[in-house]
Amino acid sequence: MTDRTFRDAFAVPAGPMELAGFEPAGRPVRPSKKRGTKPPVKRLRDLQERLWAESTAEGRRRLLLVLQGMDTSGKGGVAQHVVGAVGPIGVQYTAFKAPTEEEKKHDFLWRIRKRLPPAGVIAVFDRSHYEDAVVPRVHGTVPQEEWESRYDVINDFEAELIAAGTTILKVFLHVGYDMQRKRLLARLDNPDKHWKFNEQDLAERARWSEYQAAYSDVLIRCNTANAPWYVVPSDSKKYRNWVVGELLRETLEDLDPQYPQPPLDVDSLKARLAPPH
Amino acid sequence: MTDRTFRDAFAVPAGPMELAGFEPAGRPVRPSKKRGTKPPVKRLRDLQERLWAESTAEGRRRLLLVLQGMDTSGKGGVAQHVVGAVGPIGVQYTAFKAPTEEEKKHDFLWRIRKRLPPAGVIAVFDRSHYEDAVVPRVHGTVPQEEWESRYDVINDFEAELIAAGTTILKVFLHVGYDMQRKRLLARLDNPDKHWKFNEQDLAERARWSEYQAAYSDVLIRCNTANAPWYVVPSDSKKYRNWVVGELLRETLEDLDPQYPQPPLDVDSLKARLAPPH
């Protein structure tokens, strides 16, 4: 019996929707008194090792965790505290920044393809191809027909990955406008965090509602049956990490990866390892 | 005052030496009663974040941790439990297997260069360019003048990396012949570990003393002032992880990476973040 508790609770429903309808401090699933909000790290480690082990035999399965969200929503925090607890073997992290000059010369999926997970690996995208359906729209740098066409390009791209053995888990970390302010202020209050601060962050914040509109469309148009979107309330870091950990656990449990069982002649191998007389 | 406790205790001494002179169950530094053998994970995380932060400004420094050792010595274990506790952001893990057909068509450093750390990153090599100075010698697949010439090629290569801002920490995980037997037997006793077992492992084990001789030479000939070798007793997993963690800590503390201090006008930025009236 497959556990779908978290996927059912956090999935973006089919049809029209607005991010405004999701509460950044909401708790659609309440943590149990006993286990609290500790991500299921041990279980994730076990599942990841099995997925990795599978790939040493015939296994071609791999997982792509896409993290999107406004500044300070915690994409890096999830990578560090949830996925980080699993790796680094069989885990591959990529932060996609504003495209470089070289990247701009290629189609927007070029740099994405280079960082796709090989068999057995969990890849984490801290920002992703979805930036290209959101940022140019908000900044008005490409015409509407172009950014709108990218929804289909992305859906086709993801279908191609799935056909080749990739499971895609797409999570939007939903932080509120006020919580973002608090987190940016906290960065300003700590000189050791100033390197994380970029004046551009304020310019993006000033476009908050355009971003919410652009993300809402992405969450609708690219919410496919095989690669659905999840929205995770991210005003609480603990709650956010817990939910993403559980979504990852459910997804991996669905794959049910198995240790390969090579036909070893155990007794004869043991005999060869016997201590010298 | 730079702490050199672990580096001094585990460094390969200058001049002739034999691996046989190092005790795989030895404890050149004894853990303190209070702290035990817990690797300094929190401190490592802090240092790694600073190194990473540095690279977002002008910092070009990076670190390469080279792990070598016989089967079951725990190269993957160190990557997982020591470096894994730090990552995955700013950490890049590579396991080098037997060269592929494509890799064989290039010089032996070709595949190594592709996985060197970018600025701000700690790269972990689980096996490395040192395989190419050891395995072909033990198997007699290249003539002596070729494998012997690789010592100089490697020393020049490492000098080049150092000149470009890479700090190299080279660790030989020294497991004993008997402990390897125990660990291989444990793998055979656990069906979930059979995927880790390769009949070739026994063939390599049968060449134990040739490997010890080959590694001894590598530890002498490539023990340069700027990229010295350390030998870490690895019969105890806990002791091994602790010592590698402390060697990594000392090395990073020597670098003393600093958070960039961009010239932010904090007051004006805060004013722009004021809540709406």
Image (cartoon, coloured by chain):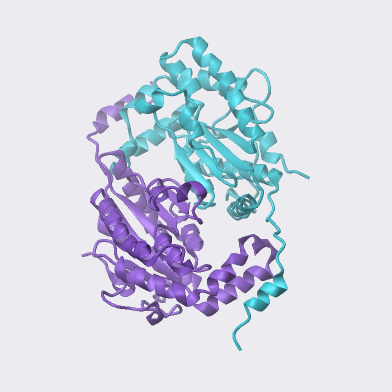
Chain colours: A cyan, B purple
Q: How many marks?
A: 0
Residue drawn where x is 26% and y is 74% of the image: B14
Quadrant position of the C terminus of chain B in the picture: top left
Q: Can you give x and y, in whole percent of width and height, for residue B252 in the image? A: 31, 57
Q: Can you give x and y, in whole percent of width and height, for residue B140 in the image? A: 46, 67
For residue B22, above or below residue A9: below
Q: Is residue B21 visible?
A: yes
> Residue B83 sits in which quadrant?
bottom left
Farthest residue toward the right?
A: A1
For residue B207, above or below residue A17: below
Toward the viewer: B102 or A223? Answer: B102
Residue drawn where x is 60% and y is 83% of the image: A275
Residue drawn where x is 54% and y is 50% of the image: A90
Toward the viewer: B88 or A180? Answer: B88
Relative side of A256 to B274, left or right: right
Q: Can you give x and y, in whole percent of width and height, for residue A51 in the image? A: 63, 49
For residue B29, above or below residue B152: below
Q: Is residue B38 visible?
A: no
Q: Can you give x and y, in whole percent of width and height, for residue B275 in the image? A: 38, 25
> Residue A29 sits in which quadrant?
top right
Residue drawn where x is 32% and y is 31% of the image: A198
> Residue A103 sits in which quadrant?
top left
For residue B26, above or below residue A168: below
Quadrant position of the N terminus of chain B in the picture: bottom left
